[in-house]
Amino acid sequence: MVAKEPEPERVEHEDTTQPIKVRQCPECGSPKLMRDYEVAEIVCMDCGFVVESKIADRGPEWRAFDHEQRAKRTRVGAPLTYTVHDKGLSTMIDTRDKDIYGKRLPPAQKAQIYRLRKWQRRIRVADATERNLAFALAEISKIGNNLALPKNILETASVIYRKAVKEHIVRGRSIQGVTAGAIYVACRQCKLPRTLEEIAKASGVDKKQVGRNYRSLVKELDYFIPPPESNPYITKLCDQLDTHGEVEATAYKIVKAARETKPNLISGRGPMGVAAASCYIASVLTGGKKTQRELAEAAQVTEVTIRNRYKDLLRYLMFTISL
């Protein structure tokens, strides 16, 4: 008798490409398997062998063509989020004082709903840890709104702060300083061009305190933070100064040539200063007519810094840049 192959473990997510590690590929032995619900197959990510076909689709049975249809047809609540202290799993009593048909509630029911709403707010925050998380995650959302940060940065910063609370790193430190440091760690991890000055200004915390909390979080939580690159800052500067695409492309070439010709030329330097100097050189070469003062104000660095990086880049790259 031929033994039946055990049925693979099913995941609970609706991702179209969900990597799984519960089985091994029978062809190459790799544990990196991916579920692709668009073609209903489990595929090995290393050799491409189809491990299983015609798998069940765990997505919804309905379709939606716009946001309004999706909101009407969905039968579940909001997705899980780490930016709320209870992860968005609790319920909220609406403040509009209307029933399901849109009619206003009578005064007696209004008073009852008011008491229920008050006790609901108290129950959601049970102990000191919950109060700490509620205040800190609200601060993260406020800083994110001031800096127009994307949702993934806020989620990452919230996870970092939760780990800091679990490891008792927050004790003895201000909540605003730790939240600002967590946001800077998230920006560095996701390679989003945000400087310490911008985060300090948005959070109302001193720049030195933000840097101190950032270093503490990286050390205590054992994070690996890659060194900052200049390319995202080049894009940011060109967007702020509204330069044409040729300036940005030339600045990319300058930084690439510097990295290939003399890596020590830009390693250890401030990425914003290197980006501002490369943008200045590119604007001169392409006729963009951007002054050092304009670049210094946009990059929040001094003109002396731009001139120093400018001289270093010209000294080594004058004959290696091909336009």
Image (tube, rainbow, N blue to C red):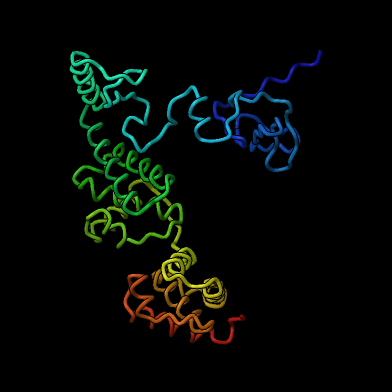
Residue at position x 62%, y 37% in the image: 17
Residue 55 falls in image quadrant: top right
Which one is in front, 236 or 179? 236
Residue, far right:
1
Of the 4 image quadrants, the one containing the C terminus is bottom right
Looking at the image, is 152 positioned above or below residue 231? Answer: above
Which one is in front, 61 or 191? 61
Residue at position x 31%, y 19% in the image: 103
- Determine whether, in the image, residue 123 is placed left or right of residue 323: left
- Determine whether, in the image, residue 226 is placed left or right of residue 91: right
> x, y (%) of residue 117?
23, 22
Looking at the image, is 230 positioned above or below residue 34? Answer: below
> x, y (%) of residue 265?
47, 76
- Determine whether, in the image, residue 95 is placed left or right of residue 20: left
Looking at the image, is 266 positioned above or below residue 137? Answer: below
Residue at position x 58%, y 81% in the image: 321
> x, y (%) of residue 216?
30, 52
